[in-house]
Image (spheres, rainbow, N blue to C red):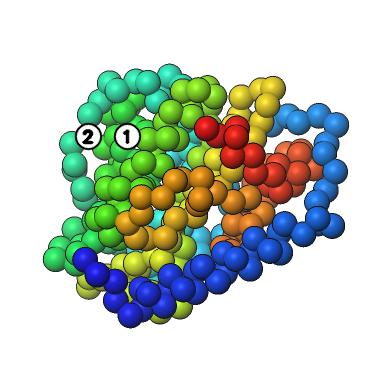
Amino acid sequence: MSMTKNQRFGLIFFFIMLIAAYLVTTEPWKKSSKPAMISIQWNNLASGYPLAPTTDTILSYEGFDLGYNEKFEQAAWVAYVLTREEAESGAFSRKNNFRPDPSIITGSASLADYRASGFDRGHLAPAGDMTWSKTAMSQSFFMSNMSPQLPAFNRGVWRRLETRIRNWAIEKDSLFVITGPLFTPGDSLIGLNGVGVPTSYFKVLVDLSPPDHDMIAFVLPNAGSKAELSLFALTVDSLEMLSGYDFFYEAPDQDVIEWLEQQMEPGNWN
């Protein structure tokens, strides 16, 4: 499927914002000093919720929490912890039971919104991360967890990143994962419910396992790509500049969080 004029404009706008975010957040005088002790001890998922102006309501499911964006009929973000045990489970396979989310009282997107649109129903919280629970797997197919993704993106570079994250969870023991869409002016809508088509998607990863905590973010345009995943990596600070979100704003040890948000060590995410 070729991109529309609006989609091309959105990608150009996205890259301009990404460059601006990188230049602003890599200024050396903005760097804070390294905390004496790097320690992350979060008691629950809410400690890692992003402060996002596009979040209308927050819902909890078996395998993930979700901040819903009513305007674009999809999640503004999903958040969950993926452990080594969960990533290695494989106990429950996907059933492709796509269906409206009964928890969205105003009504979520429907299957008809995506029909003949040229877009995949792309998971935000991946089904592949929910194989440890029958309920979690089933709930990952709610339409609130879907976002319109070009097939070349959903089945290509996005799947590669999802697979890499499961490998990192196995390697590092425990990851906090936040995923969401990013919209720009001119983005199109599909279906009678007006489901927004994002220009790009982000993922934020936090290595929760002591002693070496680490953070990294990724932003990928909603388009096919065979590029190395490292080319889409950036600091969480840069993503905050690009998205307008404030990540981990309620997490304890803010000096640690602020320092980690400024770091990006791709070598720690081989």
- Which mark is on residue 145? none
| Residue at image location 42% in from the left, 35% down from the top | 164
Identify residue for label 2: 94
- Residue 118's x, y, as percent? 19, 64
Identify residue for label 1: 128
Quarter of image, res 181: bottom left
Nearest the viewer among 267 and 30 is: 267
| Residue at image location 68% in from the left, 64% down from the top | 23
Q: For mark 2, does the 10 Å Cα neighbourhood hold few (<14), some (14 to 19), or many (20 or more) residues? A: some
Above-or-below relation of 264 to 173: below
Nearest the viewer among 64 and 37 is: 37
Above-or-below relation of 6 to 67: below
Check contact, mark 2 vs mark 1: CB within 8 A: yes
Query: Quick one: SS at disc 2?
Result: loop
Query: Quick one: SS at disc 1?
Result: helix
Instruction: Report the amino acid beneath label 1.
Output: Gly
Above-or-below relation of 9 to 76: below
CA distance for labels 2 and 1:
8 Å
| Residue at image location 50% in from the left, 52% down from the top | 232
Instruction: Report the amino acid beneath label 2.
Output: Arg
- Residue 61's x, y, as percent? 40, 40
Residue lying farthest to the front in this orientation: 227
- Left or right: residue 162 versus residue 97 is right
- Residue 260's x, y, as percent? 70, 42
Visible in this render: residue 105?
Answer: no
Q: Which quadrant does the N terminus fall into?
A: bottom left
